[in-house]
Each structure stands twice: as C-alpha cells, then as structure tokens.
Image (spheres, rainbow, N blue to C red):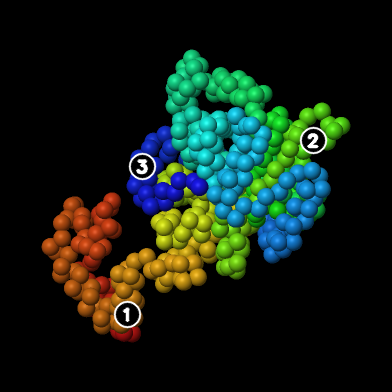
Amino acid sequence: MATITTEKYRSAANEGIGNPVLQDALANLQERLGKGAADAYRRLPEGPDLRLKAHDIRMESIEHLDILLDRLTQKITENGGHVFFAPNADSAISYLRNVARQNNVQRVVKGKSMVSEEIGLNDAFSADGIEVVETDLGEYIVQLAGEHPSHIIAPAIHKSRADIGRLFANTIGTPYTDDPPTLTHAARKALREKFLTADMGISGCNLACAETGHITTVSNEGNIRMSSTLPRVHVALMGMERVIARLEDHDVLFRLLARGAAAQNMATYVSYVGGPRRAEQPDGPDAFHLIILDNGRSKILADPQYREMLCCIRCAACLNVCPVYRKIGGHAYGYPYCGPVGAVVTPLLVGINRARHLCQGETLCGACRQACPINIDLPRMLLRLRAQLAEGDPQWSVSPANPIEKVGYGLWSTIVGHRRLYDLVFRAGRFFQKYMPRMDDMLRRLPPPIHGWTANRNLRPLAEHSFHERWSKKGIKHEQ
C-alpha cells in the first residue's frame, strides 16, 4: 500500500508555496497546457460537446461494469492471458510476488502506472530484493531522487534542469550538465540496458476494451511499449473502472485524453495488448497477466452520488487549471492522486476524515469541470464530501470533523436571520476591536477561535457605522 500522508496537507502545502522552482514550473505548465486544452477542445470537429458524449460512454461502462469485466476476462483468457481480481492492495502485491517467484524475476522495468503507486509496488519488490526500474523519464528522475511523483503526467515538474543534472551526476555517473537533450540521452542510455536485461515488464492501463479483450496504453516516449514487449513476462495493472464496452469508443476517449492531458491531437504511442505473443510472432512476452484492482472502488460504485468519479481517465487536465494545485503542488496531497481528482478520490479510498483537508482545501471555482475531457462534476462531489464532514455519515464511517465549527455556523445563521441581534453583535464587535492589535489601521490578530483568519493576512476593522445606520441618518426609512 502507498504511504499515506494526507494528514500533513497543510505543512506540505506551505512547503510547496515556499518553493520558487515549483511555483515557476507550475505557472508555466498551467499557462501552456491549461489554455492549450481549452483551445484543443474547440478545434475538435465535433466541438467541445464531444465531452458530453465521452461522459455518456464512461457512465454506460460504469453502470454495466460487472458484465464488461466478465467479458474482458473471458476474451483475455481465450487469448492465452491470465486475469486476477485483486480486492485490495495486499492481494495485488501477493499475486505479483507469486508471478515473480515462478519466473525467477530479478529485474523489473515498469511503465508509468498510477495503480502501481497506489499499491506500493516498488517498495514491495525492493523488499524482496528485486530491482524495479521506472522507465518514464519523469518517474525515473523521481525514483533516482527517492521521491514520489508530483503530477500525474509530469512527475518531475518540481525539479529544475540543474536539479536533474546534479541528480544524474550523483546517481548514474554522468558529467554534470543542465542541457535537456543531453540529460535525456543519458537517461535513455541507462534505461536501454535495463530494458534488454529485464525479466518482467509492468505497465498500467489507460483503458481496456471488453469487446476485443485488450488493454490500451498511451505514452509519448515509447517506454511502455518496450516494457510490454521486451521482457518475457508482462503484467498490466488496471483499476476496475477502466473498462469500456466497444472499440469504437476508444477513438472518442483517446482524442479527448490527449487534448486534456497535453493539448495534443493524439499521443505518440498507443499500444493494444491482449495476451502473450503467439508462435508466429517474433517478439512480445511469453506470459501476460492482467491484475484488476478494486481497493475501495466497489464502495464508490455502490454510491450513486460518487459513482461518476469512476469515469475519470487520469489525464490530469484538472491539475492543469486548478488554482490550488498551482500553488501547493502534488506532494501536498499525500497520496498518488493529487489535484482536484485527488481531492475527491483520495478521501473515498483512504477515509474521508483522514483526508478531509484535501476536499476542504479546494476553491470550488469549477475550472476542473470545465477542463475535464469527460465533463465530470468534481465541484458537486467536493461539496458532498464537505457536507459529510459537517454532518457525519455512517455509510462512509464519517464523524463530524469539527463540531465546534458547526455550532459556530449555526449561531451565525441565527444572527443573520434576526436584524436586531445582528446589529447588537456588530456593535459589540466594533467595541471590542478597539483592543485588538493593529498595524497601519488594520487588525493584525483576531482572538481564538477565529485567529486563523489573521494568520497570514491583516483585516480591515468593522466600520464605525453600518450602511443601514448611515442611510437612516439621511432620513430615509428602510425595512427591518
């Protein structure tokens, strides 16, 4: 299981805000990809409304998930592959370990996979003495640094060219340089030897097709294709929600995925894998295994209010427009899934109370829904998470996060609903603010429990007279 540090959201967010390299990198990323995705949607022959069709495609798949997974399993088995349904991370790791033992695996090359991060695959194999090598360039960089990805499709966005140059010099022994082509060539040279000597290749799965019985992977580097064809064993990891019914649906979803992720018309490498190589084929793995992971997804599926979250194809379009992610970066979320998608799915997977800061930290500006190629209503689900934290929810084992805050808002609701009480409270506030610390005629520190409002800002004091009081002095009547 991945290490969960969602409780450190606030301190990690402060670290991200104070990192100038990260701030510049995320601003540049969002400027290019956030705006680029919107333009790419508009250039679609069908126009941006194709996103609505994609939403229907994904929801249809989610509503018939049991049938589609059964069909997918049947097809892959017929093609000579093996399918394993993993109810949780531990069972997925156990199956992977068994496959590795049976095939005497010593080295694994791994394409980009969010599910592998979710189940903590690298740490598990390393504990068994098996070398695991990330082959996506960004993932390779953060692995060498002993870190975790900070973006779904740009894992090393938090590192500068100089950082990477020093890292390569210290880990793979290349002369220091901050020239991107030279650094890329050095990584390619180091990884080629790993590809050629690996016993097992592991990949993720962008989508699977029940009709044809294959999984599809997408990349811009070709590393996933080399991980799935060169080693003698290929294992693909797939969240149970990633299946769709028909091959023709791939066209819609992959065109939108490429635009949402990187403002591209189509990714460079799209690979279809349905089993081991056949006798007449010159390359490909001798064995193919597909692990279909639940790990909390069934509970999401069972809740009509959250089922839509399973439509997500992890393109990172929401990260590329989110104002919160732009300031704090991906490490603040404390789990492999970050940004608006992480703010919803992480609480559902690891516990709503445990990851409460994630959904409470979002602005609800709606940019994520506008950018999402599947038109997923993330703001609606963020609001429901907040409501559960306020009221509690036995179904999701949620206890009220802050009963005192609830009482406070209830009291505020009473105050604003009664004119005379409202005026009395504000007259008292105007009196007591005279004794609060000030700076340049601004309130520098409020008393507990509302002192958090002035932790990072000064506030204007209450005016000596309210608008209604000033209006009344002019002799004009107003309704109470």
Residue at the far front in the pictured view: 102
In what element is the residue under mark 3?
helix
Q: Name the residue beneath numbered marker 2.
A: 277
**Can residue 35 be seen by looking at this rendering?**
no
Above-or-below relation of 459 to 1: below
Instruction: Find the distance from the CA under tag 3 to the CA under tag 2.
Output: 48 Å
**Which mark is nearer the camera, 1 or 2?**
2
Bin the neighbour count of mark 1 within 10 Å (Cα to Cα): few under 14, some 14-19, many 20 and up: few
413 relative to 39 in the view: left or right: left
Seen at 27% across and 78% down, the residue is 422
Question: Which numbered disc flags the more N-terminal residue, 1 or 2?
Answer: 2
Seen at 49% across and 62% down, the residue is 382
Q: Quadrant of residue 36?
A: top right
277 relative to 366 in the view: left or right: right
Bin the neighbour count of mark 3 within 10 Å (Cα to Cα): few under 14, some 14-19, many 20 and up: some
Q: Quadrant of residue 185?
A: top right
Q: Could you tell me residue 247's position as x and y percent?
A: 79, 50
Seen at 38% across and 68% down, the residue is 400
**Which mark is nearer the camera, 3 or 2?**
2
Q: Name the residue beneath numbered marker 1.
A: 414
Instruction: Using the image, tell me which numbered label, if any, was put on residue 42.
Output: none
**Which mark is nearer the camera, 1 or 3?**
3
Q: Name the residue beneath numbered marker 3.
A: 15
Q: Could you tell me residue 73's position as x and y percent?
A: 75, 52
Residue type, numbered disc 2: Arg
In what element is the residue under mark 2?
loop
Residue type, numbered disc 3: Glu
